[in-house]
Image (cartoon, rainbow, N blue to C red):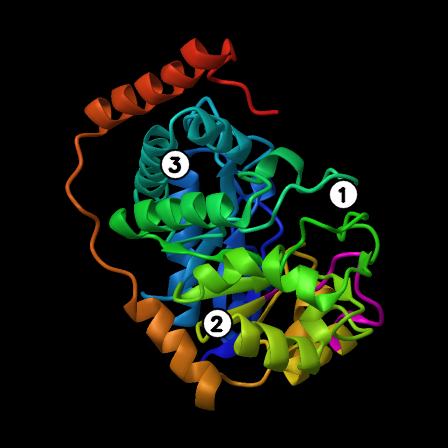
Amino acid sequence: MARAFITGLSGFSVSPTERRFLREADPWGLILFKRNIDNPEQVAHVIDDFRACVGRQDAPVLIDQEGGRVQRLAPPHWPAYPAGAVFGELYDQDPAAGIAAAKLGARLIAADLAALGITVDCLPLADLRLPGADAVIGDRAYGTSPDKVAAIAAAIAAGLLEGGVLPVLKHIPGHGRATADSHKSLPIVRTDRPTLETTDFAPFRALAALPMAMTAHVVFTAVDTLPATTSKTMIANVIRGFIGFDGLLMSDDVSMGALAGSIAERTAAALAAGCDVVLHCNGKIEEMQEVAEKSSELTGAAERRAAAALAARRPASTIDLAAARAEFARLLDQRSLLSGADPTATS
C-alpha cells in the first residue's frame, strides 16, 4: 500500500539509488521540477520509470505549472503562459473574458501535461494579493477581492479537469497576507479571525469541493501559534471546519525554511496535525528517506480522500489545440487592446 508522501527526484532520470528507494518506500506520488525536465521524451520516460518502480499506473505525478514566474515546463518545448494577475486584469475589464481566458489557459496547460503523463497540477491559487505582503505570491494571485479570486480559480480548476488533470487548491487557508517568503522563513499573520474569514479564508471556502489542496506554512495567531501545516487546530477548526474542505490535504514542501526541526520531525508533525500526505520536493535522498520513515501507509480517512481525489480525474474532453491556442491569444490581445498592456507579460 502506498505511503503518505509525495517525493521529488534529483535529476533527469531515476538513479539506481532512487529506483531502490521508490520500490521500497512506495510514495503515493511524484513531483517534478525544472531539474527533472529536459525534453518531452525524457520527461515521459522519467514518469513511466517512476510508475514502474511503485507498481501503480495511476500513481499521481504532480507539477507546479501556473504560468508567469512558476512554470516548470517552458520554451522551447512547451508554451509560456501568463501570470495569474493577467487573468485578474482582464476580468476587471470584462469579467466574462477573464473567466474564459483563465479556463482556456488551464485547459491548454492540461493538454501539455497530459501528453507527458502528468496527472496533477498544483494550481489554482486562491491567495489574495494584499498590500504590504511579501512578493512570493505577488502577480501569481488573481486579485484582491475574494469573490473575483474564487471565480477565476474555479475557472482554472474546471479547465484542468476538462483536460484530464487534477487541480490542487493552494495555499490553504491563505498565503496572500504573509509578510515573509515561507521558502525562507516563517510568516506570522496577526490579523483577527473575523477579518480572515471574510478575506483570506473566503475564496477557499467557495472552492471547498475541489479534490485536493495544499497547506500554507503560515502562522495565523488568531487561530494557533503553529503554522497551518503542523497545526491540528487550524486543520480541524478552519480547513476542515470553517472552510469545509474534505478533499485530500497535502502539505506544502516540508523542506522549506518556514518549518522548524528535522525533516523527520516536520513530516511527523504535518501528518499528526491532519495532513493526509506530506510533500517533499528537493530530491535529496537522505531527506527522502527521513520522510519515508515517518510516513505511514495511507489508511482510513486519508486513504478515502486519496482514492476520491484520483477518482475525480476524468478523460480529457476533445479539443482542437490549434484553434484553442488562437482563441487564447485573442483573449489576451483583448486585454492588451483595452489596457495597452503586453499580452505576454508575466510580471
Closer to the N terminus: mark 1 or mark 3? 3
Give me the residue at 67% from left, 75% from top: 234
Task: Mark 3 or mark 2: name the one nearer the start of the chain.
Answer: 3
Near-viewer residue (231 or 22): 231
Residue 149 at x, y percent in the picture: 50, 45
- Residue 245 bears which disc, if any? 2
Q: Which residue is mark 1?
A: 133
Q: Residue at x 34, y 39 (%)?
A: 103
- Which residue is the extreme one toward the bottom? 300
Identify the amino acid type marked 2: Phe
Provide the residue designation for mark 3: 102
Q: Where residue 198 is drawn, which disc sits there?
A: none
Q: Where residue 295 sits: x, y (%)? A: 61, 80
Q: Residue at x 41, y 57 (%)?
A: 49
Read off the magenta span. Answer: 251-264
Report the Cα–Cα distance between label 1 and label 3: 24 Å
Q: Amino acid at mark 1?
A: Ala
- Secondary structure under badge 3? helix
Main secondary structure type of the part rendered in magenta: loop
45 up-or-down from 271: above or below: above
